[in-house]
Image: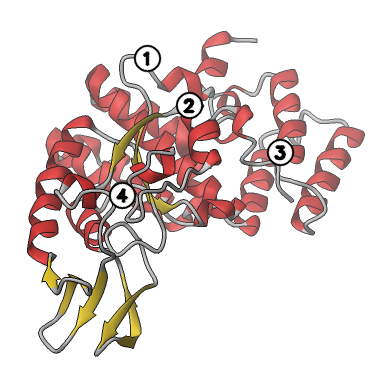
Amino acid sequence: MKAAPIELGSWSHWHADERPLRLGVSQCLLGDEVRYDGGHARDRYVTDVLGRWFELVPVCPEVEAGLGTPRATLRLVDEGAGTRLVQPATGADLTDVLAEWSARRIEALRALDLDGFVLKRGSPSCGLERIKVYRAGMPAGRNESGVFARALRERWPALPVEEEGRLNDAGLRERFVERAFCRNRWRTLVARGLSRRALIEFHGAHKLLLLAHDEAGYRRLGRLVGSAGQLPDEELFGAYEAEFQAAMSKNATRKRHVNVMQHALGHLKRLLDPAEKQEVLTCIEDYHAGLLPLIVPLTVLRYLVRRHGVEYLQGQLYFDPHPKELMLRNHA
């Protein structure tokens, strides 16, 4: 059995200590007492689980913009001149202050080359969605993003972003963390020296993972890599990165996972005896029915791939895209 293809298919092969996985995080989620009431909102999944694998970069828009702790609460308000960020208790309009600070801070964060950002839900500055907009002191019947969250999405659209509350959803959690690992792999590839050969190797290792997220995107990326000799390097690499990030932002659904595993099984069908084939098929069917977590059929498939030395599948990151300790594929 060849060692190199197995290494290519391991998440650790594509990461480097000098380019650590790095997440921006709303500072209150780390347990720092920076909320409007002087308290915090520590999230143990962020600090104890993600913090084991990611370098966490704290950001508190309201404190860093000079509002202090404790402080009067903020609201998104629309009195006919567009949505503004105000302090009802003082009447102060802080929209421009926070918008200008956000622009500067996001540029500084871009220099750190983050792999993702976890925001505090419900915050008029950090909330990603469903932040109430008020009119004449009453909810106006519509919701928006917080000022910093909106600026982050607009100025850095390729960055994986989630709220800490949404990370309680197993599917959203898996998608976010998987995207962050993919982003880190890409920037590690760029730092190591991006070439057409390296791009082909990167794409080859991510094929099944891309197929699990976005089949159309997978095909577009295949055509893009196939046209490598027809485009200038800068145009090729930029187009690939944008398409790759867009494809990975799609949900890897149960149906798509089943499709990928059946595709992988096609590479094994002439090598398996009837008992092995039936075992894999049963695991895939039980996963499809919601009776087993994804990790079970994948573990069986990976064992058979190694046993029979299928080089193409040994190089696929789909089987090992992130540390098993994160247990992202352990939910039924």
Check disc 3 and give the amino acid type: Ile
Where is mark 1, residue-wise?
Answer: 17
Name the one closer to the observer, 241 or 45: 45
Disc number lying in front (3 or 2): 2
Q: Residue at x 82, y 44 (%)?
A: 283
Indicate how the structure is coloured in the image. secondary structure
Mark 1, other Cα within 10 Å: few <14 / some 14–19 / many ≥20: few
Q: Secondary structure at mark 4?
A: helix
Q: Residue at x 18, y 38 (%)?
A: 110
Where is mark 2, residue-wise?
Answer: 53
Q: Secondary structure at mark 1?
A: loop
Mark 1 and mark 4 residues within 8 Å of each other at the beta carbon: no
Check disc 1 and give the amino acid type: Asp
Mark 2 and mark 1 residues within 8 Å of each other at the beta carbon: no
Q: Which of the two discs, 3 and 1, labels the residue nearer the N terminus?
A: 1
223 left or right, relative to 98: right
Q: What x and y, as percent, mark residue 170? A: 61, 51
Where is mark 4, residue-wise?
Answer: 243
> Which quadrant: the N terminus?
top right
